[in-house]
Amino acid sequence: MKIIFSNVWKISLGGLLILLVTFTLGRCTAPSPQSPASKPKASSLKPKVSLWTCSMHPQIKLPNPGQCPICGMDLIPLDTGGGSNNPRELTITPSALKLMQIETSPVERKFVQADVRMVGKVDFDETRTAFVAARMPGRLDRLFVDYTGVQVKQGDHLASIYSPELLSAQQELIQALQSVKALTNSQSTIVRDISQSTVEAVREKLRLWGLTAEQIQEIETRGTITDHITLYSPVNGIVIHKNAQEGGYVKTGDRIYTVADLSRVWVQLEAYESDLPWLRYGQKVTFTTEAWPGETFEGTIAFIDPLLNAATRTVNVRVNVDNPELKMKPGLFVRAIAHPSIAEDGKVTNPSLAGKWICPMHPEVVKDAAGACDICGMDLVSAEELGYVTADETNAPLVIPATAPLITGTRAVVYVEVPDQEKPTYEGREIVLGPKAGTVYIVNDGLSEGERVVTRGAFKLDAELQIHAKPSMMSVAQSAESMKQGEMNMELKPQTLCPVMGGVIDKQYFTDYNGMRIYFCCPGCETDFLSDPDTYLEKIKAAGEKPETLNKATE
């Protein structure tokens, strides 16, 4: 029995020792509770806030938290997430940059080409259209071309006219020739000269009636008269009008045929008034037509109408086009495009015409020096007189991609990447845009070469600026001068609210400061005011109120 009790006691003692060791090890290995000093301060976790604003009145910006002096709502931190104190800048994190998918492009200085698109149709060249008319009264006994559309060559016979007046004129010529022969041996020079003058006068009359030199020579050689005259085509071309019928009578001046030379045609285009600054005399224009799919044709601007069509708000632009294969049929619709090269300030340049002289009537006549046109004899004019500027690197325009600016009415805003910053920072900047040239805009003011502008994600940056009550595309950033002027023009009410507590003032509590009397709602506010008077004066002004002047308060 004693042995059993001894064993039980030993087992109990061993269990107690095991429990004691386990408890001791647990205390040693357990983490010690943090002391109050080791706990992170709540204030250190909060972002540093320098300005506070009202969510309903973002124009309120105060250095300390409190209530909005206008609506009484609690102020919120202004700079949280905005980073920069510059009202035009926005700083974002690298992760936010990836989410916003922002892309930038450099501001470049280079010559660009605009795309001026026009539509129109092919027309006859008025300078290559000729009329075949009766130069004497008579009867059309034969029309060799009896329908329109026939192609003729210069000198081809077109019609035969019977005319009694032609008979008398031929008889007069024969008699004058006989008189000259009879006076060949005469000693009277005066009589001989008069007879010769008569012959020349009759020849000229027949020539004016449409007889060729060969026909007149045939009459003189044959010595007999004919009662018919044959009319010939004056040019190569197509008979586009037939105005008489065989057997009909015509008077002097009656039009019988119209012949048009289609080896050169006009393309009459309609240009919108907004595209007129780009168009110049002598520019090349390419165009296409559905009649010849896949082919591109080229011409030269020969005339820009000085008058605007009030109904269509367009201006007629005439293009000269060589048509040796006669593919261009009058009446065909065309789609044309001009590619003017643009210099600084939206001026047009053409390197191929630099230093050249051009005929003002025939743009295809271009020479290296002043002189006269080989076609019409007019004096040539310099390319500069026609509106071109000399192209060099100094007058290349500043350009940005067309996706960069945010345009709202008359304003244009871009976001510029601020260099040498720890975090991605972008500055909103209002710029002055020139005309659009293809896929780029010309910048007249506001940017410098080499700066990088946001071309993708600008709307996201702008929305972020609006959230932080900073200037954006929807709100203009006021300059210091304009803000001062606005403050001068703003009518401030007499003070009714305490700048410290925001309660209604009690005029028995006040203090005088810099010629002004400031009222408070209770005695303790005066001490707070004097600790930071500028801040509280700003709160009074933000509420649309003003303190009393000292002179007025003491009256």
Image (cartoon, rainbow, N blue to C red):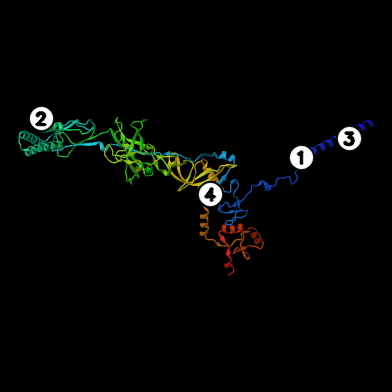
Residue 51 position within the rendered picture, expressed as x and y whole percent measured from the top left: 60, 51
Which of pointers 2 and 3 indicates the residue nearer the eye? 2
Q: Which mark is residue 221?
A: 2
Q: Are marks 1 and 4 in contact (CB under 8 Å)?
A: no
User: Is residue 138 among what the camera can see?
Assistant: no
* Pick the front one: 370 or 331: 370
Label located before the other in sequence (2 or 3) = 3
Residue placed under numbered mark 4 in the picture: 471
Mark 1, other Cα within 10 Å: few <14 / some 14–19 / many ≥20: few
Tell me where residue 222 appears, x and y as whole percent. Answer: 9, 29
Whole-Å distance between the Cαs marked 3 and 4?
81 Å
Q: Nearer the viewer, residue 273 or 18?
A: 273
Q: Earlier in the sequence, mark 2 or mark 1?
A: 1
Q: Secondary structure at mark 3?
A: helix
Q: Is disc 2 surrounded by few (<14), some (14 to 19) or many (20+) residues within 10 Å?
A: few
Mark 2 and mark 3: span between their CA atoms?
Answer: 166 Å
Q: Of callouts 3 and 1, which one flags the residue occurring earlier in the amino acid sequence?
A: 3
Label 3 crowd bin: few (<14), some (14–19), many (20+), radius 10 Å: few
In 3D space, how far apart are the residues under numbered discs 3 and 1 (Cα atoms)? 30 Å
Q: Quadrant of the N terminus?
A: top right
Circle 4 packing at 10 Å, graded few (<14), some (14-19), many (20+), is: some
Among numbered discs 4 and 2, the one appearing first in the sequence: 2
Name which of mark 3 and mark 4 comes first in the sequence.
3
Residue 146 drawn above or below residue 459: above
Q: Position of residue 388 (x, y in %)?
A: 37, 41
Question: Mark 1 and mark 2 in contact (Cβ < 8 Å)?
Answer: no
Q: Report the amino acid beneath label 3.
A: Leu
Which three-letter amino acid code belongs to the residue tagged 4?
Answer: Pro
Query: Which label number is shown at residue 13?
Result: 3
Cβ atoms under marks 3 and 1 closer than 8 Å: no
To which residue does mark 1 refer? 31
The mark lying in front, picked from 2 and 1, is: 2
